[in-house]
Amino acid sequence: MQEDDTDDLSSVGSILYNIFEVKADLKERRRVVEVCDTVVKRGGRLAGAGIVAILERIERETKRLASGQRTVVAMDGALYEKYPQYRQYMQDALVELLGDELACHVQIKHTKDVSGLGAALLAATNSIY
């Protein structure tokens, strides 16, 4: 919906008609795009806020960000991978909540199967040799 850059939002109109069998005029199509953007913005900002909470907890003990060390957050999932607006809203939340000075040291990187990798790392760090 958000990628429709036509003047009459024809793609939005087609989706509404083909999936929901709803004929929507331009005003209604604009409203649908606005609602979609609001939902995506909320999701991205909530995810960003969760990341900030974890980073702040780590920061209390390590002072990594304050000392200028780069911190990489591994992110998996099709939503993050394929939805640029979602990624941008998440990044905006990081900047808003951490400030430019600290947020510039945080990189969110898309990583395939990050949950499996995380589980393997956790198991390895807790293994007794």
Image (cartoon, rainbow, N blue to C red):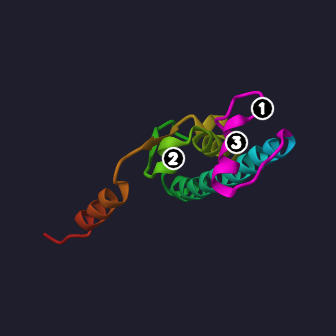
Residue 63 can be seen in this image: no
Q: Residue at x 52, y 49 (%)?
A: 79
Q: Horizontally, is 51 left or right of 124 in the view? A: right
Q: Quadrant of residue 66?
A: top right
Q: Identify the amino acid type marked 3.
A: Val
Q: Which mark is residue 12?
A: 3
* Label 2 crowd bin: few (<14), some (14–19), many (20+), radius 10 Å: some
Give the residues in magenta: 1-26
Q: Horizontally, is 9 left or right of 76 in the view? A: right
Residue under label 1, please give it: 8
Q: Residue at x 78, y 45 (%)?
A: 34
Q: Quadrant of residue 14?
A: top right
Q: How many marks?
A: 3
**Eyeballing the image, is 76 above or below 88?**
below
Q: Residue at x 77, y 27 (%)?
A: 7
Q: Identify the amino acid type marked 2.
A: Tyr
Q: Position of residue 80 (x, y in %)?
A: 51, 47
Q: Horizontally, is 106 left or right of 20 in the view? A: left
Q: Which mark is residue 80?
A: 2
Distance between mark 2 and mark 1 Cα atoms: 28 Å
Nearer-the-camera pick, 68 or 19: 19
Q: Earlier in the sequence, mark 2 or mark 1?
A: 1
Distance between mark 3 and mark 2 Cα atoms: 22 Å
**Eyeballing the image, is 89 above or below 55?**
above
Q: Position of residue 29 (x, y in %)?
A: 79, 43
Classify mark 2: helix, strand or loop: helix
Q: Residue at x 48, y 52 (%)?
A: 62
Q: Are marks 3 and 2 in contact (CB under 8 Å)?
A: no
